[in-house]
Amino acid sequence: MAVTLEQLLNWLQLIDEHIIEQRGYLTELDSAIGDGDHGANLARGAAAASNKVDFEHPEYIDDLFKLVGMTLVSSVGGASGPLYGTFFLRFASSAGHVAELSAAQLASALEAGLAGVVERGHPERDDKTMFDAMEPAVLAFRTGIVDGDVPYAAVLASHAAQAGCDATAGLVARKGRASYLGERSVGHIDPGAASTALLFQALAEALA
């Protein structure tokens, strides 16, 4: 099953909708262990990216995600802008100048995005960051496409991201502002992991 540019545009639109809908929740999570601006920053970045896409109408996947990535880097404050921006920029480079992706190509693009996040932020598993939701999601997507079933793989990825997100509540933060809290960070879900779960939820919905 090929994944089309239209489906990927829908993915981005759904991300935008979920971020706006969950803006208050993300802010609440970040207020507990961070700066309290994760929801607002991402909502601003998602809106800016949507406006750029609507204005420029990119016709190829690499152009689409380069535009999104660069907009996030330039418009979202804190660590989340550069990290999500890098994710989409690396996704773009892997996807290439095409209008559709095979299941394997989409898996590779997601893996390239994850590798970009690792290179930029140097996270490790159980650091209590977006990586704890993103890595299992990307691994689950690759596992799920064995039979070429993209919708099934996307659902697996969404479930894995949510499970990884939920598990951050039990972790002591080892990165970012939350790490200053030490043991007091336990009991709180990481906001970056929560927004990553929304990203993969949107992917599952777009590819259903």
Image (tube, rainbow, N blue to C red):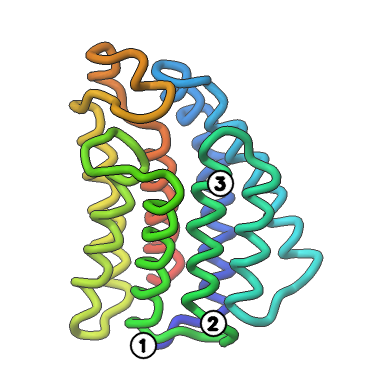
Please state the horizontal and vertical placement of residue 3, each as a whole percent of the image: 45, 81
Mark 1 vs mark 2: in front? 2
Which comes sooner in the sequence, label 1 or label 2?
1
Residue under label 3: 82
The residue at the far right in this view is: 55
Label 1 sits on what residue type? Met
In this picture, is 174 found above or below 74?
above
Residue under label 1: 1
Q: Residues within 10 Å of mark 2 (few under 14, many from 20)?
A: some
Q: Secondary structure at mark 3?
A: helix
Q: CA distance from mark 1 to mark 3?
A: 32 Å
Q: Residues within 10 Å of mark 3 (few under 14, many from 20)?
A: many
Question: In percent of the image, x 46 and y 67: which residue is there?
Answer: 206
Q: Quadrant of the N terminus?
A: bottom left
Label 2 sits on what residue type? Gly
Please state the horizontal and vertical placement of residue 127, each as a whole percent of the image: 27, 35
